[in-house]
Image (cartoon, rainbow, N blue to C red):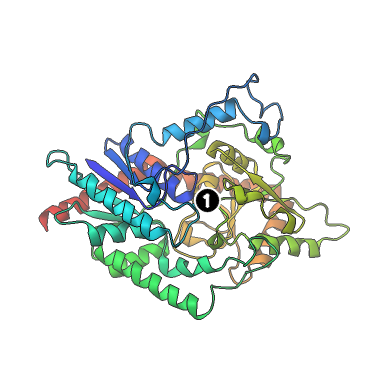
Amino acid sequence: MRLLLVGAFPYPQNHGSQIYFQEQAIALRSLGAEITLLTYGTGRPPPRLVQSTSTDRLAAGQRPEARSGTIREIEVAEYWRVLDGFEHFASPKWTSPASLRSGPSWAKPLADFGLIMTLRNALASQSRHNAFDAILTHNGEATLAALRLLPRPRPPIIYCAHTLLGKELSTYLKCPKKRDFSNNSIGRKGLGATSWVLDRIGSRIDRLLASGADGWIALTRSAECVMRHFSDAPGALIAPAVPDPLLSAHAVEAGATARANGLEPGRFFLYSGNLDAYQEVDILAAVARSRAVDAGPGRGRDLPLVIASHSPRSTSGRLDAPSGIEFLQVDSLAEMQALLASARASLLMRRTEGGFPIKLVNSLAVGTPAIAFHGPEWGLEHEHNSLICSPERPALSMAAAIDRLQKSDDLRARLARGARSLYLDRHQPVPTATQTLELVEEVCRRHRSG
């Protein structure tokens, strides 16, 4: 089976959407599918391999700024793993947006025009004997462009719904005017009437995508409900998957990674991901302030809250963040996975429904429990593999969960076992790819008969 995976984003890139895209492609290929990729222009240049006189500077305790050798080799291996063996069509680089932030921007229409022209050319270059059996579109822009602008006859289009625009579109207005932690935007759901209008527009787009696609894949329970309500096409809830890091040839020793960054293994709480507004990272500032207020003579030292991101902006808020928050910029996925493995728990501040954080899958894979605001939406179970907080009282409830987990090693161990078990049950590549291929075959049968 020949499949074309289309992503409305630069690729490769260490962001959640791109990781979901790449792991879907790699897993489908492992089951025998012939995969072609089509995305915006290249997201990042190939990393250069710098040889080191030390076999492992990280294990020797040097800070990440001095990294080379083994860590650099892992970064190179990661980069080429996501491209090796794939035919990859990329839209012209001049049409790609300069910013890698999620959400709408003035540059996106040009980027989407470049994407659809590249897609039309890719389909036109295929003969009847090597035509694509189906197109899997990632993100709403790619799906809408394919549905509206591709000439017929065309292969069936299967929409991979990364999020619900009716829930998420207004969250991109939540950025404080200053890009720091001093302007707390917790509780602001956009900007009044503008937010309401954006949510209505987003919901309408969600309905168009659901009703127009020949098939769909939802990542969360709320997205599945929207798709089933507005679509008669075949579809399924298929959770995102990542390869088992405990079996990886490119694993980094977790304890050494934590210590190299000045952290004590098992004695910090970690947010790992991008810093865009919809992630609601500003909740951590309120959590830190709440913990500082509660501090007393007999309380003991609070464990630090760490923000680790691949974004260069990961250190831009240092001066404005309250005490108790530390910042790290991380280059490789392996290093981020090692930090997750050595954290006491991972923190997910996102309260918007519809999307599935890849950071959560990475956390479950290494057996690190999550503190989050959604349970069934993401398949989590309170006090079994996670602690679920109140979205209406985000800072206070998350601070209480952190305090509870800080004090109890037994609770942490029990949640860790549950987290790893959930990964093995729901997020392994081969089972999810098998389910995806079964759905694709069903869509193709219906498309041929219709």
Whole-percent x, y for residue 218 in the image = 36, 58
Q: Residue reaching furthest front?
A: 94
On screen, residue 105 versus residue 180, left or right, reads: left
Whole-percent x, y for residue 245 in the image = 51, 36
Q: Quadrant of residue 202?
A: bottom left
Q: Nearer the viewer, residue 414 or 36?
A: 36
Q: Residue reaching furthest right?
A: 297
Residue shown at the point (64%, 40%) measured from the top left: 342
The vertical placement of 403 against 249, above or below, is: below
Q: Nearer the viewer, residue 35 or 105?
A: 105
- The quadrant of the rendering that contains the N terminus is top left
The residue wearing badge 1 is 360
- The quadrant of the rendering that contains the C terminus is bottom left
The kind of residue tagged 1 is Leu
On screen, residue 192 versus residue 177, left or right, reads: left
Q: Secondary structure at mark 1?
A: helix
Q: Residue reaching furthest top?
A: 53
Q: Residues within 10 Å of mark 1 (few under 14, many from 20)?
A: many
Whole-percent x, y for residue 96 in the image = 40, 50
Whole-percent x, y for residue 231 in the image = 27, 66
Q: Is residue 268 visible?
A: yes
The vertical placement of 277 against 28, above or below, is: below
Q: Nearer the viewer, residue 363 or 50?
A: 50
Q: Quadrant of residue 237?
A: bottom left
Count of all numbered marks drawn on residues in the image: 1
Residue shown at the point (67%, 65%) measured from the top left: 395
Residue shown at the point (63%, 69%) measured from the top left: 185
Q: Is residue 270 visible?
A: no
Residue shown at the point (41%, 66%) measured from the top left: 165
